Image (cartoon, rainbow, N blue to C red):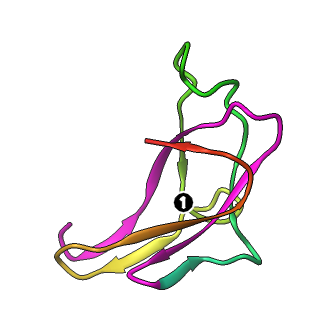
Amino acid sequence: PRAGRHALLLRYALGAAGDSTRTAALDERPLVSAKTPAVFTPTGGWSSEGDDWREAWLGAGGEAVIAELAAGEHTLSLRNERGPLNLD
């Protein structure tokens, strides 16, 4: 991306009954910690038989994390803290 401030929007499906949580790092620097993980709520399915996809900002409590990025490539890492999740 170009240099500047960016929010990260993720597309996901979650067919399990409970929430799924993830921590995140950008270029090995924490964006979302285990104390305040990103929470993904159930979407009603895994999108294998219908369109169960939703979009969510990467952040804690539904608030988008704003990352200050230099121009060029970056690496986003998500770590499973609890529950299954399909990411697109």
Identify the residue at image location x=74%, y=50%.
Answer: 83
Q: Quadrant of the N terminus?
A: bottom left
Identify the residue at image location x=73%, y=72%.
Answer: 36
Q: Is residue 37 above or below residue 15?
A: below
Give the left or right position of residue 46, taking residue 68 as reference. Answer: right
Magenta span: 1-28
Who is closer to the viewer here, 4 or 34?
34
Q: Is residue 31 above or below residue 7?
A: below
Give the left or right position of residue 53, taking residue 61 as reference. Answer: left
Q: Quadrant of the C terminus?
A: top left
Identify the residue at image location x=23%, y=82%.
Answer: 70
* Residue highlighted by disc 1: 58
Q: Position of residue 47 (x, y in %)?
A: 55, 23
Q: Position of residue 7 (x, y in %)?
A: 42, 63
Q: Quadrant of residue 61?
A: bottom right
Q: Position of residue 23 (x, y in %)?
A: 62, 69
Identify the residue at image location x=82%, y=42%.
Answer: 18
Give the left or right position of residue 87, taking residue 63 as reference. Answer: left
In the displayed orientation, state which residue is furthest to the bottom.
29
Q: Quadrant of residue 85?
A: top right
Q: Is residue 75 above or below residue 57?
A: below
Q: Is residue 47 above or below residue 34?
A: above
